[in-house]
């Protein structure tokens, strides 16, 4: 890192820039307000200023601070080294079990969605090719273009030197720790003292909302990246240089690579709030605005150029995807944060335990769209909430106002369907309908609340003058907190003596249809224990607040308060990321072993009934009610996507992310409304001869092939559907469709799977009756992004390949490029003349190559900027911090 020890202006701006960054942690009246001697400053200048520094005008130096003793090395006493180290150590301790065992994360979409998709993508890299196409899902789909694969996210590099399972879980582990570090250094750049910043970062790193995203592979990066985005933005404004603007753009590009609309908005809201704060703090506001605009434009251009290899293919996919037209309001607002979730801010496990297969000890369905909470916990602790109240006494009024607005904004947006304003925003703000689950917005509020807690800690450890000014208010808050804590503890004591009094209240909040499955006695005990924990920690925190008015060493008291925050948060949130054994992660069920062997004969698809959780009427053979047994049942029962790691190709299905092509989704929607007989006919047309079902299928075209055990009262049957079309066939009879919608109608209306008929679109297409036995086609090579067919045509006709039609596929007839036509609504066809011919399909999307070129150019610019060191410009007179 560059040392800031170059030319110094008369006003000593660079000297002031160094400020008080590294005093002894336990010397002076306020040891956690870092102050440093000139000797030590010169000896260690620049070592940590890149990560943590702020303008002199933002510092509030405590009186009586003594310089470091001579000869003390800066690294030994630098809080900006040791507090981050403590955050990392705390993170490692929190994730000790997954880090040092074979256990892995599994809840929700991890094992049944992200794990298999990620495995297929990494296997593509292992073969030495870019992960461009996934032939295993939804009739074949673009892979890299789907942001959920995160094909170019840096944590994929873990797979270069680590086993797949370990690299996979490391992706989850590093982001909360990165988030804590990022928030610490962001707060230091905002001028918040080291110990206070450490306390707020600890809250954010182990907060319920942040750890809730451990259940979502593609969203957990936002927990780590958003604080660093704010850090880079403030740094780009502090140091007027192109390098800092490009650094901001690089982090913005990372978040764009892991693009998720709502969490991306959280980052934008944070940057906007920090920019507004700089404007209202500045004395030369027009100049500050111009610098913000410059940093924003340069950062956005560089960030999106850096992520172009992901963004351009995604922009090609989204208009063609099922969600491209946007979600309706019901889908976009589902899983909103209910106002009652605010109680979960201070009461851990307020709604019970969602990690059971039947939700017997969870009572929040009525408030969360008849399901579990999206954020499985909103818990940040009573101590954090109390510190946030103390923060209103802070003298940093403008920063305090911005943070409060961010918290309020995030809560209002997270309320979603419970906030009438959200419907107006949905109707009038373009792009808002592309995202869903408004609860995600509360990540921004959690971050701002953590900084608020840091400001509260600063108030407690303030100077003597500040303490005297705020003493009465601080005492009042401490007394009020203790009174509330006593009331809560008294309530717990009452319910302990009268346990039947709490159960009726919970029963009244449960949907009547679900009441029979609930264990109300356990729910009452769990809620009472949660309230008791809140009361104890609120009483302890309030007592510390009260004692801060009399304690002569406020830094020691603040350190004790930080320990209290950790003691309240970490044990309560430890269960938010349940684990499953490595053997269960690697488990390949019997049905997948069998299908893998059958599918090796020729490319063919499998249709499997989609299981939704919790599944009614299923009795699992399990020693306990852990959700892990339900995950194991899903694997044994042939749920789609698990088998793609074994080379099994699936037909149409319900889409988790809505980023499959619209045609595959329309065929799925059609299947759900067709009669059983018509549905089987559609399966024949989709090259789907294998059917998995827990029940019987009564149709003369179907015969039972195999039965599999699922570890439940329901078995799994494999049926073979006769008369299914092969993956590639040659047709001479042509049906014309005047429009794309008409093509779907004609395709569905065919009463049988005809291997001599193809439906083509466009007015230039000529219908033809064809001739019997026009020829044959077979696949000789089938790879993810390349298919080779041989055709023996007795007459001119069309080679039909029942893989998804999508831009970027090219066909070569005897080595010469040929036009690919959209066939049978969703597939591909190539005109083939009479004779023996060879047709090759290759996927070469222009969007990917254009994005790759743009990303390569951005990387080159970034490398040049990294080593280009022009003369730095100092801060202009008249600016404020």
Image: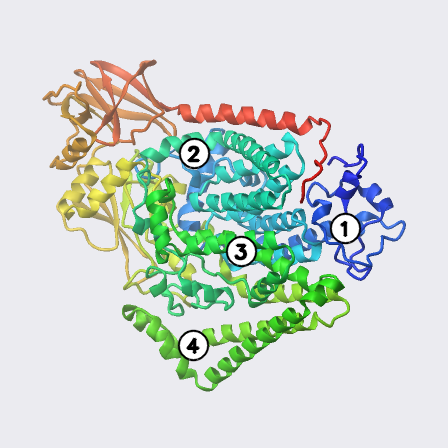
Image x and y of residue 629, in percent: 40, 60
Separation (CA) of disc 1 from disc 4: 48 Å
Circle on res. 19: none
Q: Which mark is residue 404?
A: 3
Choose mark 2 or mark 3, whichever is in front: 3
Q: Marks 2 and 3, Cα distance to the nearest angstrom?
A: 39 Å
Label located before the other in sequence (1 or 2): 1
Q: Nearest the camera: 839 or 589?
A: 839
- Of callouts 1 and 4, the N-terminal one: 1
Q: Name which quarter of the figure residue 283 lies in.
A: top right
Q: Can you tell which of label 1 and label 3 is closer to the viewer? A: 3
Q: Mark 1 against mark 2, which lies toward the viewer?
A: 1
The residue tagged 4 is: 524
Q: Earlier in the sequence, mark 4 or mark 2?
A: 2
Q: Residues within 10 Å of mark 4 (few under 14, many from 20)?
A: many
Left or right, 724 with respect to 406, comes to left
Helix, strand or loop status at disc 2: loop
Query: According to the image, label 1 marks what residue?
Result: 78
Residue 144 — which label? 2
Q: SS of the residue at dot 1?
A: loop
Determine whether 135 is above or below 34 in the image.
Answer: above
Q: CA distance from mark 4 to mark 2?
A: 48 Å
The percent position of residue 168, horizontal first and vertical second, equals: 52, 46
């Amino acid at each position: 890192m560059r040392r800031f020890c170059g030319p110094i202006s008369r006003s000593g701006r660079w000297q002031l820039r160094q400020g008080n960054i590294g005093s002894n942690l336990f010397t002076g009246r306020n040891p956690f307000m870092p102050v440093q001697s000139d000797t030590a400053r010169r000896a260690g200048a620049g070592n940590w200023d890149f990560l943590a520094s702020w303008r002199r005008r933002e510092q509030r130096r405590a009186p009586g601070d003594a310089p470091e003793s001579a000869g003390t090395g800066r690294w030994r006493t630098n809080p900006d080294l040791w507090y981050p180290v403590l955050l990392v150590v705390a993170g490692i301790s929190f994730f000790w079990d997954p880090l040092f065992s074979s256990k892995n994360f599994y809840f929700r979409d991890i094992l049944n969605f992200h794990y298999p998709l990620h495995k297929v993508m990494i296997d593509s890299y292992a073969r030495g090719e870019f992960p461009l196409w996934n032939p295993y899902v939804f009739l074949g789909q673009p892979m890299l273009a789907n942001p959920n694969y995160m094909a170019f996210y840096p944590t994929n590099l873990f797979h270069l030197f680590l086993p797949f399972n370990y690299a996979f879980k490391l992706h989850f582990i590093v982001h909360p720790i990165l988030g804590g570090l990022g928030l610490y250094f962001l707060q230091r750049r905002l001028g918040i003292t080291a110990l206070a910043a450490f306390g707020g970062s600890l809250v954010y790193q182990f907060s319920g909302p942040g750890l809730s995203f451990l259940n979502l592979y593609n969203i957990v990066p936002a927990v780590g990246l958003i604080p660093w985005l704010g850090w880079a933005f403030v740094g780009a404004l502090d140091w007027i240089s192109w390098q800092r603007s490009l650094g901001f753009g690089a982090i913005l590009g990372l978040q764009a690579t892991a693009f998720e609309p709502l969490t991306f908005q959280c980052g934008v809201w944070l940057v906007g709030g920090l920019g507004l704060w700089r404007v209202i703090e500045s004395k030369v506001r027009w100049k500050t605005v111009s610098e913000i605009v410059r940093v924003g434009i340069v950062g956005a251009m560089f960030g999106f150029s850096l992520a172009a290899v992901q963004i351009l293919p995604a922009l090609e996919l989204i208009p063609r995807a099922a969600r491209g037209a946007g979600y309706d309001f019901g889908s976009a607002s589902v899983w909103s944060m209910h106002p009652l979730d605010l109680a979960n801010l201070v009461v851990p496990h307020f709604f019970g335990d969602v990690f059971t297969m039947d939700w017997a000890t969870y009572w929040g369905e009525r408030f969360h769209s008849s399901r579990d909470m999206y954020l499985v916990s909103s818990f940040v602790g009573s101590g954090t909430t109390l510190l946030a109240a103390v923060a209103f006494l802070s003298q940093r009024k403008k920063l305090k106002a911005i943070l409060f607005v961010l918290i309020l904004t995030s809560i209002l947006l997270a309320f979603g369907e419970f906030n009438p304003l959200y419907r107006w925003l949905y109707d009038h703000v373009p792009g808002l309908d592309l995202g869903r689950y408004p609860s995600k917005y509360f990540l921004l509020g959690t971050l701002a609340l953590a900084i608020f807690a840091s400001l509260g800690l600063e108030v407690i450890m303030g100077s003597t003058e500040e303490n005297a000014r705020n003493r009465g208010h601080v005492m009042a808050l401490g007394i009020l907190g203790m009174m509330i804590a006593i009331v809560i503890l008294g309530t717990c004591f009452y319910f302990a003596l009268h346990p039947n009094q709490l159960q009726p209240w919970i029963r009244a909040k449960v949907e009547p249809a679900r009441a029979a499955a609930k264990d109300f006695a356990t729910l009452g005990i769990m809620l009472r224990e949660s309230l008791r924990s809140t009361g104890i920690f609120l009483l302890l925190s309030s007592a510390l607040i009260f004692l801060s008015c009399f304690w002569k060493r406020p830094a020691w008291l603040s350190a004790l308060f930080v320990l209290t925050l950790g003691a309240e948060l970490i044990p309560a949130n430890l269960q938010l990321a349940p684990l499953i054994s490595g053997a269960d992660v690697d488990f390949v069920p019997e049905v997948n072993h069998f299908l893998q062997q059958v599918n090796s004969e020729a490319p063919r698809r499998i249709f499997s009934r989609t299981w939704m959780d919790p599944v009614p009427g299923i009795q699992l053979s399990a020693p306990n009610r852990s959700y892990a047994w339900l995950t194991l049942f899903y694997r044994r029962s042939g749920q789609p996507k698990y088998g793609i790691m074994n080379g099994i190709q699936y037909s149409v299905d319900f889409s988790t992310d809505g980023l499959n092509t619209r045609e595959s989704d329309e065929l799925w929607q059609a299947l759900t409304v067709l009669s059983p007989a018509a549905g089987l006919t559609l399966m024949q047309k989709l090259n789907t001869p294998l059917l998995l079902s827990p029940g019987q299928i009564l149709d003369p075209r179907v015969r039972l092939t195999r039965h599999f055990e699922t570890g439940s009262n329901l078995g799994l049957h494999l049926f073979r559907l006769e008369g299914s079309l092969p993956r590639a066939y040659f047709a001479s009879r042509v049906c014309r469709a005047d429009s794309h919608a008409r093509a779907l109608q004609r395709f569905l209306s065919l009463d049988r799977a005809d291997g001599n008929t193809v439906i083509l679109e466009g007015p230039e297409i000529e219908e033809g009756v064809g001739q019997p036995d026009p020829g044959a086609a077979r696949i000789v090579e089938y790879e993810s992004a390349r298919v080779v067919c041989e055709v023996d045509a007795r007459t001119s006709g069309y080679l039909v390949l029942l893989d998804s039609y999508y831009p970027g596929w090219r066909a070569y007839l005897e080595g010469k490029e040929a036009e690919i036509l959209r066939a049978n609504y969703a597939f591909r066809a190539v005109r083939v003349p009479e004779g023996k011919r060879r047709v090759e399909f290759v996927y070469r999307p222009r969007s990917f190559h254009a994005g790759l070129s743009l990303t390569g150019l951005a990387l080159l610019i970034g490398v040049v900027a990294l080593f280009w060191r022009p003369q730095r410009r100092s801060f202009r007179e008249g600016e404020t911090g």
